[in-house]
Amino acid sequence: MRRTPKRSDGKRTLENLLKSALELFAKHGYYGVSIPMIARKANVKTATFYQYFTDKEAIYKKLLSEAFYLFENYLQASYNQSVKHRISNFVQNYFAFFIENPHYYRILHEAVYLRRIALKKIEKILDYAVSHICPASDFVDQMVLRWFVTGPTRFIAIYNSLSSNYRIEGKVIEELVDFTLHGIDSNEHKLSEEVFQIDVKPVVVETTTTRLKLLQAAEKLFGSRGYRNTLVSDIAKVAKVASGTVYVHFQSKEQILEELVTSTNRNFRLTLSTTIRKFQDRRDAEIAGYFTFLKFFNLHPDMYLIVRQAEFFNPEISMNYYMKILQSYIPPLEKAISNGQLRNFTPQNLALILMGIGHFMGEDLVVQHRVKDHEIVTYLERLASYLYKGLNSKEREKLSLNEQTK
């Protein structure tokens, strides 16, 4: 900030600028907001803005700092309570932040995508919260626990922000706590070794038409430069066609994004259904599904990045992507619950819980690290114990070790 106002009228102007910027950043994203837009909404001249802030980045950083402060305070850990109460506090406090501070939530959510430093800060806050629920035994355990404990709650908040038909109600919170504590396994299932013998092939598209060449060029550019930084003329240049040719096949850059996300969804679901069809037990199929998901997007990392970008540039595209996965997920879960393989959950809630784990696992293991196959196995073996028996699996391990040392 250039100056901190002392008089009441200056304080009101500053407050109005911050409130206006907060609403605009939440609605349009960082790159969709300009200083004149902020000044206009605050009903002041653009020159007045510069009396308080040097540039757009300065006011954004102040709001981002406030968002982090709020988020960290909402997630204050509970110490002297049972594990169940600590899980419940985390879930309820996260949703309280999301519901009571929608603008700050949106700024944080986008910042994690835009800035690595914001991602690391969010991870640090979440890891601290998780450590007071269930301390990790090593680095792998720390990452797996972050996906398992926080992923479902975080993803349900994302889904709720995209969907006007989904409501975060008491049943959702109840099942999130139950899942985290007890997992999905209805008895004593042992993970099949065949789960990690799946062979996932890259999707090969014959670029025999101009339309496919344009899509392939857009995939490469959106993945490497980002959607925002790619021009239609860039796509045409990489595809080796005239810029006007793009508009023969697509109305806009946004339509290209939509088709890429749609084709990714279709190819992924086809690959997934093909590879997990052999597993009769849904508990094996879940881990096999995660294995397929990670291998598929490790082969197509640009497409995973494009799917993530769609959420910020066209939420409807992103919503359609998640809805198609959700709709294909629910029937097999209903069947597995009815035949006693899985514990009794609302199928839609359980699908979103499992999607949430996968969503943030993909963030870490595809976008951030690009792990190798044997590393994927290490993470998924650890995840399986939590997925099947929840955090109770930790207590079972302790009891087993105690018995062995007697």
Image (cartoon, rainbow, N blue to C red):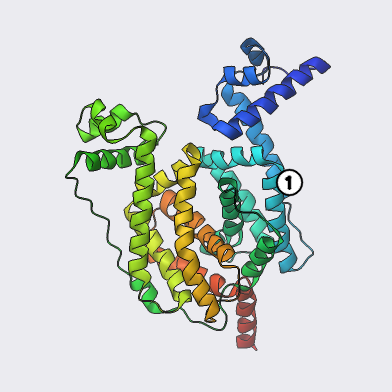
Q: Nearer the viewer, residue 99 or 123?
A: 99
> In the shown orientation, is residue 232 left or right of residue 330?
left
Pinpoint residue 327: horizontal percent, then vertical percent.
47, 60
Kind of element beneath mark 1 = helix
Q: Residues within 10 Å of mark 1 (few under 14, many from 20)?
A: few
For residue 306, what is the image quadrant?
Answer: top left
Q: Position of residue 315 (x, y in %)?
A: 50, 42
User: Is 22 or 117 nearer to us in this picture?
Assistant: 22
Q: Residue at x 55, y 31 (%)?
A: 28
Pick the quarter of the image with the N terminus: top right
10 to the left or right of 352: right
Give x and y (percent) for residue 61.
61, 30
Q: Nearer the viewer, residue 111 or 252?
A: 252
Q: Residue at x 54, y 44 (%)?
A: 119
Please tell me whether residue 175 is drawn above or below residue 47 in the rendered image. Answer: below
User: Which quarter of the image is occupied by the C terminus?
Assistant: bottom right
Question: Where does label 1 land, which residue?
Answer: 73
- Which amino acid does the dot numbered 1 rest on? Asn
* Number of dots carrying numbers: 1
In the drawing, does residue 15 fall left or right of residue 229? right
* Residue sticking out furthest to the bottom: 406
Direction left: furthest residue: 208
